[in-house]
Amino acid sequence: MISFVGLNGQIEVDNDGIILTRVAKLDKVFHQAGKIIIPFCQVENVVFSEGGLTNGFVAFLRKGDKEPHSVFSAIKNDTAVIFRLTKNKNARQLVNYVKSKI
């Protein structure tokens, strides 16, 4: 299992899919608390933006999901997790693993 902790949630990836968990106060500002489970068969695209001057984000898009174009639109996306510049390497590894599964 791969685990990744961002600013507005945690991502866990197992053999079946992706689990997004939001439990902290900051996580609940734009999203409902709890878990979202996304099987790999439902993931149509993975959007990854590295952190730099602004935070980075990763979003797992299902059919009908709107693609975030910036960290500001990713904040409102239910399948996106925001992260700091220092987590670029770990986020890239997570994205590459998910892409290999879909």
Image: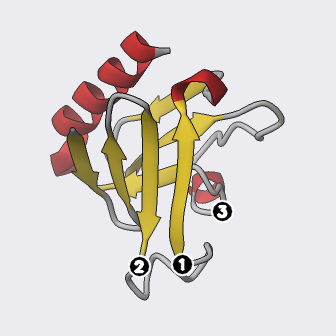
Q: In the displayed structure, does residue 17 sit left or right of residue 38?
A: left
Report the residue marked by disc 1: 33
Q: List x then y, in percent, for residue 25.
A: 43, 88
Tell me what residue is drawn at x 60 percent, y 22 percent: 41
Type of residue at label 1?
Answer: Ala
Type of residue at label 3?
Answer: Lys
- Name of the residue lying farthest toward the bottom: 25
Q: List x then y, in percent, for residue 66.
A: 77, 40
Secondary structure of the residue carrying tag 1 is loop
Q: Which numbered tag is attached to residue 23?
A: 2
Q: Which of 83 and 45 is in front in this view?
A: 45
Q: In the displayed structure, does residue 33 sit left or right of residue 82?
A: right
Foreground mark, 3 or 2, reads 2
Tell me what residue is drawn at x 17 percent, y 33 percent: 89
Give neighbour class at mark 1: few <14, some 14-19, many 20+ (Cα, 10 Å).
Answer: some
Q: Which numbered tag is attached to residue 42?
A: none
N-terminal-most mark, 1 or 2? 2
Q: List x then y, in percent, for residue 101.
A: 41, 15
Q: Which numbered tag is attached to residue 76?
A: 3
Q: How far apart, in angstroms, are the residues tagged by discs 3 and 2?
A: 16 Å
Give neighbour class at mark 2: few <14, some 14-19, many 20+ (Cα, 10 Å).
Answer: some
Foreground mark, 3 or 1, reads 1
Task: Give the quarter of the figure containing the N terminus.
Answer: top left
Q: In the displayed structure, does residue 65 sit left or right of residue 82?
A: right
- Name of the residue lying farthest toward the front: 16
Displayed quadrant of residue 58: top left
Type of residue at label 2?
Answer: Val
Secondary structure of the residue carrying tag 3 is loop
